[in-house]
């Protein structure tokens, strides 16, 4: 494992990470400030990123998810558990709004089934649990590629790789915010350290890299190094989605 931002071992740094909050769906937008590295995308640019949407959990809040096939959305496991009881949320109470922007969206589907990494334990704050904080949502009906083109998953993220992030957060819940000039700064197993900005509520936001075929999703943001705003910590997708898909069969 290498990291260019801290001399602390990853196992110790993870103890300090604050899991990103699942925010009420009706939360009022707040201004992130001119010093924020995350900027609202223009409406004209929305079409490129329709695969990224808001996941609304009925009666609880929202997070961010990414359509990776016509019927599968990848996000983080902790978004899909009740904050009050710690139990898994019923799939039909999970709503995916692809390309959500100020009340409009390209497609809306509910969940039919959910697959969570078997090693994930809701509420546990440890390096192993952060590494396991990954889930797939199977949608009740497919979203045709002609409506929303899925974002394919990639692999093999390493320190130094440039990435782009898009998210719905506490400060801007009604539209995607974009950050392009950030990178993976270190890796320990499936955990990716970054210098991308995170704020409460961006759970599930994708780390996007560029391959020969175009944009690919390399990982999802699960936590941040800070309480209000800090560097995002993500988990890599490489080689893990097949196992989660197998749980849905």
Image: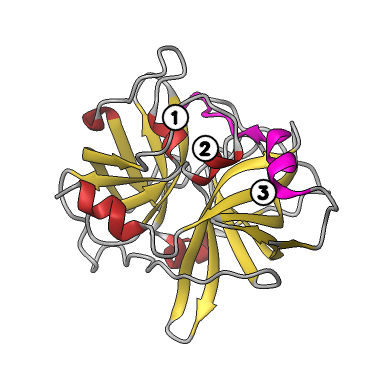
**Residue 219 shows in the view:** yes
Residue 4 lies in the magenta stretch: no
Q: Secondary structure at mark 1?
A: loop
Q: Earlier in the sequence, mark 2 or mark 3?
A: 2
Q: Position of residue 165 (x, y in %)?
A: 59, 58
Judging depth in this view, the residue of 60 and 34 nearest the camera is: 60
Give the mark toward the camera: 2 or 3: 2
Quadrant housing the N terminus: bottom right
Q: Which residue is mark 1?
A: 121
Q: Position of residue 47 (x, y in %)?
A: 42, 65
Q: Quick one: label 3, few (<14), some, or many (20+) residues within 10 Å?
A: many
Residue 62 appears left or right of 147: right
Q: Secondary structure at mark 2?
A: helix
Residue drawn at the location 81% of the way across and 48% of the way down:
8
Report the Cα–Cα distance between label 2 and label 3: 16 Å
Q: Earlier in the sequence, mark 3 or mark 1?
A: 1
Give the mark toward the camera: 3 or 1: 1
Q: Which residue is mark 2?
A: 129
Marks 2/3 in contact by CB < 8 Å: the verdict is: no
Residue drawn at the location 45% of the way across and 42% of the way down:
76
Report the Cα–Cα distance between label 3 and label 1: 21 Å
Residue segment shown in magenta: 9-25
Residue 157 appears left or right of 49: right
Q: Quick one: label 2, few (<14), some, or many (20+) residues within 10 Å?
A: some
Q: Secondary structure at mark 3?
A: strand
Residue 23 lies in the magenta stretch: yes
Judging depth in this view, the residue of 110 and 15 nearest the camera is: 15
Marks 2/1 in contact by CB < 8 Å: the verdict is: yes
Q: Quick one: label 1, few (<14), some, or many (20+) residues within 10 Å?
A: some
Q: Which residue is mark 3?
A: 232
């Amino acid at each position: 494992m290498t990291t260019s931002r801290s001399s602390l071992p990853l196992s110790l740094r993870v103890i300090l990470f604050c899991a990103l909050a699942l925010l009420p769906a009706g939360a009022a937008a707040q201004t992130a400030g001119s010093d924020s590295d995350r900027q609202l995308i223009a409406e004209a640019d929305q079409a490129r990123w329709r695969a990224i949407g808001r996941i609304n959990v009925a009666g609880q809040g929202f997070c961010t998810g990414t359509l990776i096939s016509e019927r599968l959305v990848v996000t983080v496991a902790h978004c899909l558990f009740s904050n009050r009881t710690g139990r898994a949320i019923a799939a039909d109470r999970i709503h995916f709004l692809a390309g959500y922007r100020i009340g409009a969206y390209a497609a809306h589907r509910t969940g039919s089934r959910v697959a969570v990494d078997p090693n994930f334990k809701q509420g546990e704050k440890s390096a192993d649990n952060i590494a396991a904080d990954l889930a797939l949502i199977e949608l009740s009906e497919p979203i045709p590629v002609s409506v929303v083109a899925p974002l394919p998953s990639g692999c093999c993220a390493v320190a130094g790789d440039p990435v782009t992030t898009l998210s719905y957060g506490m400060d801007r819940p009604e539209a995607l915010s974009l950050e392009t000039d950030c990178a993976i700064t270190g890796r320990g197993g499936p955990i990716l350290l970054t210098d991308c900005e995170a704020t409460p509520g961006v759970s599930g936001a994708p780390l996007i890299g560029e391959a020969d075929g175009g944009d690919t999703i390399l990982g999802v943001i699960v936590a941040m190094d800070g309480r209000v705003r800090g560097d995002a910590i993500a988990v890599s997708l490489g080689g893990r989605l097949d196992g989660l898909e197998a749980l849905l069969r």
